[in-house]
């Protein structure tokens, strides 16, 4: 299937590693011109270079913290100045810490809202008018399966990603007339560097090897394994593509069957 992504201009946030990096690489493989960001300029540039070396695509790495208004604006403006337009926005950020309600300070809710909801909304606010004017656009938010089945102990993720999902659905209906789609990709357990570190940390507290923790997670998944970041990225690329032109307002879980609900 030709995804029709050749020469499309894509912004991928929080993409120096993990799922963001894999999404940027997948879009580059499909011929898109990619602008990626992460907080550290050097790491963003290294990631961009790595993707360019592998795919031959035009990839730029920009230092921008997506929780910072000005930095996010700089990211969008720079891409727009260099490429002349923006066709695709993939929003992403690091995950919030684990917590239970009794231990959670109000400030931590504010921070989580900044990191995992407002970061996406702010980037969308910058790119949507241009997408609507050119009558073509794709916004894909990286969220989590926690929006379909809340995960015990992930209070902030369960709370603020649900807010982002409500926002995305609402906006998708407002911009659909302009041929702009807004969708979410909800990863299940995915073996990124961060997930590997989380496994190591949890395993230490349980006095067990890291592999045991990964096994515990894998056992919850009908496929009995964690996802590879590339598997999440493939869904992102499809939703970003010409072929997904009539799909909007959905949350597509990519989780090996982990979510048990019908929809
Ligand atoms: P990761 O920690 O491996 O990568 C996160 C990336 O985001 C890094 O490049 C980091 O530099 C960048 N980043 C973090 N905060 C940023 C900020 N404020 N501004 C700009 N860049 C920033 O994480 P991951 O495993 O790839 O996960 C990506 C997202 O998907 C997270 O929100 C995570 O909670 C969510 N998620 C992950 C999994 C999983 O199992 N890995 C499952 C469900 C949801």
Image (spheres, helix red, strand yellow):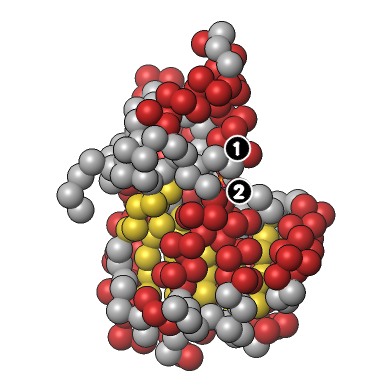
Mark 1 C-beta closer than 8 Å to ligand 1: yes
Q: Is residue 5 left or right of residue 148?
A: right
**View extreme (bottom): residue:** 134
Q: Nearer the viewer, residue 241 or 159?
A: 241
Q: Is residue 222 above or below residue 184?
A: above
Q: Find residue 164 and report its horizontal and vertical position in percent.
A: 38, 54
Query: What residue do we see at 59% from left, 57% from top?
Result: 22
Residue 151 location (% of width, % of height): 35, 33
Say whether residue 257 is left or right of residue 228: left
The answer to whether residue 41 of the structure is visible from this angle is no
* Mark linked to residue 18: 2
Residue placed most toward the observer, 100 or 49: 49
- Is 152 displayed left or right of 238 in the figure? left
Residue 46 falls in image quadrant: bottom right
2 and 1 marks in contact (CB < 8 Å): yes
The numbered dot on residue 194 is 1
Q: Residue at x 65, y 77 (%)?
A: 33
Question: How many marks on residues?
Answer: 2
Residue drawn 41% across the image and 43% down it:
188
Rounded to the nearest whole Å, what is the CA distance between mark 2 and mark 1?
Answer: 8 Å
The image position of residue 240, as x and y in percent, is 46, 73
């Amino acid at each position: 299937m030709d995804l029709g992504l050749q020469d499309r201009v894509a912004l991928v946030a929080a993409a120096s590693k993990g799922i963001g990096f894999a999404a940027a690489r997948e879009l580059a493989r499909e011929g898109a011109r990619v602008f990626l960001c992460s907080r550290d300029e050097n790491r963003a540039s290294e990631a961009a270079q790595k993707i360019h070396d592998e795919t031959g695509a035009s990839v730029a790495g920009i230092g921008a913290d997506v929780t910072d208004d000005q930095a996010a604006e700089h990211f969008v403006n720079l891409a727009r100045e260099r490429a002349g337009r923006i066709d695709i926005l993939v929003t992403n950020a690091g995950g919030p810490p684990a917590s239970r309600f009794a231990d959670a300070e109000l400030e931590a809710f504010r921070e989580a809202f900044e990191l995992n909801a407002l970061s996406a909304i702010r980037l969308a606010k910058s790119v949507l008018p241009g997408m609507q004017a050119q009558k073509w656009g794709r916004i894909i938010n990286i969220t989590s399966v926690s929006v379909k089945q809340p995960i015990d102990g992930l209070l902030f993720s369960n709370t603020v990603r649900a807010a982002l999902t409500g926002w995305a659905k609402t906006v998708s209906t407002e911009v659909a007339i302009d041929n702009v789609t807004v969708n979410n990709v909800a990863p299940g357990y995915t073996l990124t560097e961060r997930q590997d570190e989380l496994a190591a940390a949890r395993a230490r507290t349980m006095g067990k090897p890291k592999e045991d923790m990964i096994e515990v997670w894998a056992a919850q998944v009908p496929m009995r394994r964690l996802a590879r970041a590339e598997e999440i990225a493939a869904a992102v690329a499809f939703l970003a593509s010409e072929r997904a032109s009539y799909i909007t307002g959905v949350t597509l879980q990519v989780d090996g069957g982990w979510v048990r609900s019908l929809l």
